[in-house]
Amino acid sequence: MKFKHILVLLTFIMFSSCIVKSLKPFYTQEAIEFQENLLGKWEASNGSKWLVFSIIDIYTEQKKDSLFNSLTQEDLKIYKELKDAYLIGYLEKEQENIEDAETYMAVPFKIKDEVFIDFIPYDFVDLGTSDLLENHLLKTHSVAKLESLDNKKIKLTWLDSSRLNDLYKESKVKLKREIVSPTESDSDNSDYVLSASSEELYQFLEKYVKSDIKNKWESDTKFTLSKVSNYETLKESYK
């Protein structure tokens, strides 16, 4: 394996290991609430670009020739499941081609008056490694808190694994999890993924939001985004 490929993979693993990951979504269906203001093109302070589409718009565009003529039961099922979800394309500062974007499916939901986004990778970018290695990368859910700073600026802060680690050490959380490591004794290189149900994860977040835990939203993975174009302009740009 080329050295630069190792660096790319390590960067991917280091980024993903900072956030809490789950096999199941962090939301329940009843908590989903679409946030139309998120649609459009956003830019982060580091120059990265976030392209936020309605995933159902993309789906219906692909099916438009038959949408009102021959919708199958499978089409209707997909429509119902995806109608409040986003497809988010993430481009680094130097990237412009949408085909180079990392893509995520994201679902907005609320706990009381606070908005959260559940993320799951939709498609991996080419890491420059073999298909065999990339097939070992598991697509998991993560959760970020959304804060509106003003009409055209938002902040996304991911739930950091160090916060949850502290709760586990203090026996203050009982969410089921699976430990992942190269060997059973290699604790220094271990990671974990939550295996609790969506209902349990949502209940945990409800308690976490109400808690008085110090610095509970302190995180190494956070982005402040400024809107640079509205949704209609974004769609026209990438037709």
Image: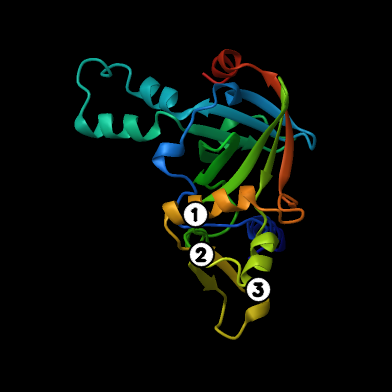
Residue 72 position, x and y percent, is 20, 28
**Distance of label 1 from label 3 (alpha carbons):** 18 Å
Residue 154 in the image, given as x and y percentages of width and height: 70, 30
Q: Earlier in the sequence, mark 3 or mark 2?
A: 3
Q: Are marks 1 and 2 in contact (CB under 8 Å)?
A: yes
**Alpha-carbon span between mark 1 and mark 2:** 8 Å
Give the CA separation, mark 3 to mark 2. 13 Å
Q: Which residue is mark 1?
A: 201
Q: Which residue is mark 2?
A: 175
Image location of residue 124, percent across then percent down = 53, 48
Q: Earlier in the sequence, mark 1 or mark 2?
A: 2
The residue at 63%/48% (across/down) is 210
Circle 2: residue type: Leu
Q: Is residue 102 visible?
A: no
What is the quadrant of residue 79 in the picture?
Answer: top left
Quarter of the view holding residue 81:
top left
Closer to the camera, 40 or 161? 161
Circle 1 residues within 10 Å: few <14, some 14–19, many ≥20: many
Q: Tell me which label, 1 or 3, sits earlier in the chain.
A: 3
- Give me the residue at 60% from left, 29% from top: 51
Q: Residues within 10 Å of mark 2 (few under 14, many from 20)?
A: some
Horizontal and vertical percent for residue 178? 50, 70
Left or right relative to 26: residue 75: left
Nearest the viewer among 179 and 131 is 179
Residue placed at 57% from the left, 28% from the top? 52
The residue indicated by pointer 3 is 169
Query: Could you tell me which residue is drawn at 62 percent across and 44 percent down?
Result: 144
Does residue 8 show up?
Answer: yes
